[in-house]
Image: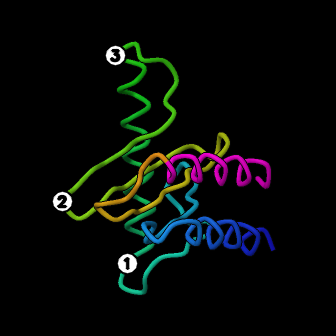
Amino acid sequence: MRADLLTSVLTELNGTSADIEASGVISTDGLMMASVLPANMDEDRVGAMSAAMLSLGDRTAHELGRGTLEQVLVKGDRGYVLMTYAGTEAVLTVLAKPNAKLGLILLDVKRAAQSISEML
């Protein structure tokens, strides 16, 4: 039931912008809770990478005196990976196209993360 609710939030998020290619809600230990991913994408790999990057981001922000981590953004030549906390026990990961309008996507991701946090 909860997975269905999470999937509906992700489906709505993906529908807010044609630039969003995929999204997932991952536990902080790397297990996929819900996802809307392309068929060729391994959700276990997405979960593990998201948890690892967020953990490293947490440590980096703390060690370098930047305060509490809000998000991790990775930019590659084929697009973006955006990770943000959705409560204390989950991570929202979004994959976006390289020409994405990040300002709008960041706003939509923040709203979705808040909704997910309230569900969990």
Q: Which amino acid is tagged 2?
A: Asp
In the displayed structure image, the side of residue 4 where residue 93 appears, left or right: left
Q: Where in the figure is residue 101, as x and y percent of width and height? A: 41, 54
Q: Name the residue at 42% across, 86% down.
A: 39
Is disc 3 placed on a helix, strand or loop?
loop
- Mark whose residue sits in front, 2 or 3: 2
Q: Position of residue 47 (x, y in %)?
A: 45, 62
Mark 2: secondary structure: loop
Mark 3 residue type: Leu
Helix, strand or loop status at disc 1? loop
Nearer the observer: mark 2 or 1; the answer is: 2
Viewer-nearest residue: 29 or 70? 70
Mark sitting earlier along the chain (2/3): 3
Q: Local crowd at mark 2 within 10 Å, few (<14), some, or many (≥20)? A: few
Q: Quadrant of the N terminus?
A: bottom right
Residue 6 on image: x %, y %: 70, 66
User: What mark, if any, has residue 52 been given in the picture?
Assistant: none
Out of 32 and 100, give the one closest to the viewer: 100
Query: CA separation, marks 2 and 3?
Result: 27 Å
Give the residue pinned by disc 3.
64
For the residue pair 65 and 89, the one nearer the viewer reads as 65
The amino acid type found where label 1 is placed reads Met
**Residue at 65 percent of width and 69 percent of height:** 12
What whole-number distance in Å separates the C-alpha atoms at marks 1 and 3?
A: 33 Å
Q: Earlier in the sequence, mark 2 or mark 1?
A: 1
Q: Which residues are magenta?
A: 104-120
Left or right, residue 77 beside residue 2 = left
